[in-house]
């Protein structure tokens, strides 16, 4: 019999096979939980902790070749030894993990549930991105196409052990599956094809958003809803109107994506890494997008000092048209990797309780002197949705562009009827 210490767990490299008589100290159990070390008790095989087989080394070159366990036949491995994860270290422990019949983690999973409506390109990728955060107990994917959401959800779940996430993923054709969801991402709807504007999608997607909104109101009445479906401002307005949810709980996703696009295009100029460029895209998700250059920096230095004026203007225009650029290249459907990452990062920030200042499509109220409509503004999010609209100091020309953007959006929304 030996006592399994914290150090044993840290040396275990993802998995540990111990004798039935060994004692796991509470501290070691906690450390196992933190490092996601899987502990198997075996009555027949006694393997000393330090010789337990490291399963999938994170850095193959950096780790010594493990000694074969004394009882192992040449070429044989310990039971359970091949279920390791490349991303195991630091990932949360699956709630169902047990040692001697006792759960290693708390028996109750307090993490919130999320749902994604539409299991198409954006929806499927968003569900996977959300699951990979392990911030949710479950992500439910819903699509009207029979089997699509369930099939994709099962396929994604099969990657859980490899990737090291613990969020369950389920699929359904029924909006009743939204029950218990604290966060819903709405992606159902048609994407545009080359030659179409986002506004061309209004009729067909309004039908879809209306029906889904009724389901959200019924089955997830306290959820925060992030709308992705285009045309973004109109569909966000419709979602808020049909659910009757307060403005703080219906948020359009576009500003995070448009800001990220601008920053990544700036990085192509070689002035900084994408994550070191700071900028925000306000106004509409379209022609009236406003990227205030007065606030745009790379490693803290104003972009206007780093990049020539006409070059900057061209990059602003490219960012504004990036959606169409991708549509034209794909020739079928629209962007989904960066949109999914954008939506998932908004939910992750909410679940963590706070976000930095991001751009999102929200009800303006009296902010920035624009008409009261859904428009892209700087906000902070918290667990309940929009925590506050943040006042940034804009140049008068930027402020005027924002006012014009809001006017155009308000007009389009009024035409929805
Ligand atoms: N806001 C943004 O920045 C942004 C970015 C990318 C895409 N979009 C928009 O997101 C939407 C989805 O794009 P996509 O590429 O995923 O399209 P897609 O065609 O790949 O997927 C759409 C899915 O919605 C499903 N669907 C349709 N009606 C439904 C309903 N009533 N209930 C449940 N599911 C339903 C379809 O079966 C399909 O699987 C489009 O409107 C697109 O323009 C917005
Ligand atoms: O451009 C589109 O139609 C999809 C989306 O709004 C995008 O910006 O990628």
Image (cartoon, rainbow, N blue to C red):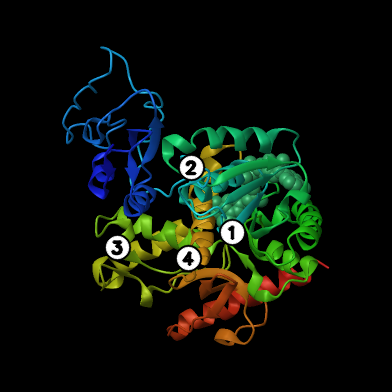
Task: Please state, as top left, top right, bottom left or bottom right, where the N terminus lies in the image.
Answer: top left
Give how far apart the Cα atoms at labels 4 and 1 are: 11 Å
Q: Please tell me whether mark 1 or mark 3 is closer to you in this view.
A: 1
Structural crowding at the residue carrying mark 1, measured as other residues with C-alpha within 10 Å and reported as few (<14), some (14–19) or many (≥20): some
Q: Considering the numbered disc 3 on the image, is that residue within a helix, a strand or a loop?
A: helix
Please tell me which of labels 4 and 2 falls first in the chain: 2
Q: Considering the numbered disc 1 on the image, is that residue within a helix, a strand or a loop?
A: loop
Ligand 1 within 8 Å of disc 3? The answer is no
Which of the 4 image quadrants contains residue 60? Answer: top left
Q: Which residue is mark 2?
A: 97
Q: Which residue is mark 4?
A: 352
Please tell me which of labels 3 and 4 falls first in the chain: 3
Q: Please tell me whether mark 3 or mark 4 is closer to you in this view.
A: 4
Q: Pointer 3 and pointer 2: residues touching (CB < 8 Å)?
A: no
Please tell me which of labels 1 and 3 falls first in the chain: 1
Of the pair 181 and 148, the residue shown nearer to us: 181
Which of the 4 image quadrants contains residue 224? Answer: bottom right
Q: Which residue is mark 3?
A: 276
Give how far apart the Cα atoms at labels 1 and 2 are: 19 Å
Q: Please tell me whether mark 4 or mark 1 is closer to you in this view.
A: 1
Q: Please tell me whether mark 3 or mark 2 is closer to you in this view.
A: 2
Q: Pointer 1 and pointer 3: residues touching (CB < 8 Å)?
A: no
Give how far apart the Cα atoms at labels 4 and 2 are: 24 Å
Please tell me which of labels 1 and 2 falls first in the chain: 2
- Is residue 130 among what the camera can see? yes
Structural crowding at the residue carrying mark 2, measured as other residues with C-alpha within 10 Å and reported as few (<14), some (14–19) or many (≥20): some
130 sits left or right of 230 in the view:
left
Q: Which residue is mark 1?
A: 112
- Is residue 193 among what the camera can see? no
- Residue 402 coordinates in the image, percent (x, y): 54, 77
Give how far apart the Cα atoms at labels 3 and 2 are: 39 Å
Q: Is residue 363 above or below residue 253?
A: below
């Amino acid at each position: 019999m030996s006592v399994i210490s914290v150090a044993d767990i840290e040396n275990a490299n993802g998995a540990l096979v111990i004798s039935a008589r060994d004692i796991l100290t509470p501290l070691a159990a906690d450390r196992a939980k933190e490092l996601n070390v899987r502990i198997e008790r075996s009555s027949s095989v006694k393997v000393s902790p330090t010789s337990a087989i490291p399963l999938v080394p994170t850095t193959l070159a950096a780790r010594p070749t493990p000694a074969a366990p004394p009882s192992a036949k040449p070429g044989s491995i310990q039971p359970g030894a091949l279920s390791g994860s490349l991303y195991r270290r630091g990932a949360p422990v699956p709630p169902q993990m047990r040692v001697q019949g006792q759960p290693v983690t708390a028996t109750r999973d307090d993490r919130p549930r999320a749902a994604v409506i539409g299991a198409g390109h954006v929806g499927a990728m968003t569900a996977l991105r959300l699951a990979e955060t392990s911030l949710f107990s479950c992500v439910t994917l819903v699509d009207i196409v029979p089997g699509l959401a369930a099939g994709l959800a099962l396929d994604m779940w099969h990657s859980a052990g490899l990737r090291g996430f613990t969020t369950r993923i389920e699929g359904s054709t029924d909006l009743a599956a939204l029950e218990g969801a604290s966060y819903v991402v709405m992606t159902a709807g048609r994407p545009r094809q080359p030659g179409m504007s986002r506004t061309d999608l209004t009729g067909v997607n309004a039908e879809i958003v209306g029906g889904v909104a009724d389901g959200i109101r019924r089955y997830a009445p306290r959820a925060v809803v992030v709308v992705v479906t285009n045309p973004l401002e109109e569909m966000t307005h419709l979602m808020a109107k049909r659910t009757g949810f307060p403005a703080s709980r219906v948020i359009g996703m576009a500003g995070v994506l448009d800001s990220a696009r601008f920053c990544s295009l700036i990085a192509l100029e070689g002035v900084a890494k994408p994550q070191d460029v700071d900028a925000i895209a306000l106004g509409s998700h379209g022609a009236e997008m406003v990227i205030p250059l007065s606030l745009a920096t790379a490693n803290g230095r104003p972009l206007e000092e780093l990049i020539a004026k006409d070059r900057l203007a061209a990059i602003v225009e490219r960012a504004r048209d990036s959606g169409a650029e991708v549509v034209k290249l794909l020739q079928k459907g629209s962007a989904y990797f960066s949109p999914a990452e954008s939506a998932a990062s908004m939910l992750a920030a909410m679940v963590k309780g706070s976000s930095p200042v991001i751009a999102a499509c929200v009800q303006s109220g009296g902010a920035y002197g624009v008409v009261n409509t859904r428009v892209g503004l700087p906000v902070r999010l918290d667990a309940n949705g929009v925590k506050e609209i943040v006042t940034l100091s804009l140049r008068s020309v930027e402020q005027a562009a924002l006012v014009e953007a809001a006017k155009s959006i308000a007009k389009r929304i009024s035409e929805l009827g």
